[in-house]
Amino acid sequence: MREWIPISTSPKGRLALAAVQTFGGRAFDEVTVGELAAAADVTTGAIYHHFGSKLGLYEFVREDVERRLLDRMEGALAAGSAGDASARVRGALVVGFDFAVRERFLHLLGAPPAGAEDRLVALLAATTSSPVLGRVLAAGWRAALAAVAYGADPDESRAALRALDLRLAA
């Protein structure tokens, strides 16, 4: 559990909120330190003081956003039909997709984490009892987000996730 929750009026909290919005809408490489600082109404030094670097800030907000995503997906898996594992997995993928689109986390969640355990793959692999299928499903889910990030209709991407025909044991 995180040691603290950023308060939106503190410099650290404002940086976290600005980073979530900025990195959610654009790729990491497209965002500058100056832009993040300006959005949070702080100096660039505040980024280095609180997070060490732009990457440190990115990793901080990605961790938070990914945890919120996984909480929703785990809830959808638990609430799904007990006898239909395929429907539960599809439901979790759609719930996660809708969350990411609604909150505009397309770029934050659209790529696997760099150098860290991919917890989305781990969740899907545990649910399907297949590490390979977990990777394939996570890649497909992220492709659906990327499609929306680059202009596709979210309804089409959601329909593609719902159309997955998984043959899983109950």
Image: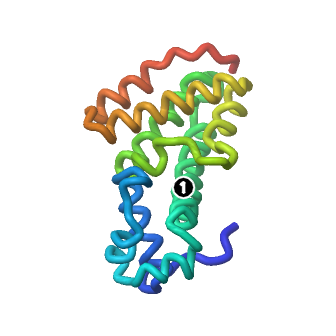
The answer to which quarter of the image holds residue 138 is top right
Q: Which residue lies under the disc numbered 1?
A: 68
The x and y percentages for residue 2 are 66, 70
**Amino acid under disc 1:** Arg
The answer to which quarter of the image holds residue 161 is top left
Query: Taking 72 as reference, is 132 above or below it?
Result: above
- Left or right placement of residue 38 versus residue 167 in this view: left
Q: Is the C terminus in the top left, top right, bottom left or bottom right quadrant?
A: top right
- For the image, the number of numbered tags is 1
The x and y percentages for residue 71 are 59, 51
The x and y percentages for residue 18 are 39, 69
User: Residue at (46%, 84%) from the top-left corner?
Assistant: 11
- Left or right placement of residue 146 versus residue 127 in this view: left
Other-residue count near label 1 (Cα within 10 Å), few / some / many at <14 / 14–19 / ≥20: some
User: Residue at (54%, 69%) from the top-left corner?
Assistant: 53
Q: Is the N terminus in the top left, top right, bottom left or bottom right quadrant?
A: bottom right
Q: Is residue 103 visible?
A: no
**Could you tell me which secondary element the residue under label 1 belongs to?**
helix
The x and y percentages for residue 96 are 48, 42
The answer to which quarter of the image holds residue 21 is bottom left
Query: Taking 55 as reference, is 153 above or below it?
Result: above
Q: Which is nearer the eye, 10 or 161?
A: 10
User: Residue at (57%, 34%) from the top-left corner?
Assistant: 80
User: Residue at (38%, 64%) from the top-left corner?
Assistant: 32
Query: Taking 98 as reference, is 160 above or below it?
Result: above
- Left or right placement of residue 11 versus residue 38 in this view: right
Q: Which is nearer the eye, 126 or 112?
A: 112
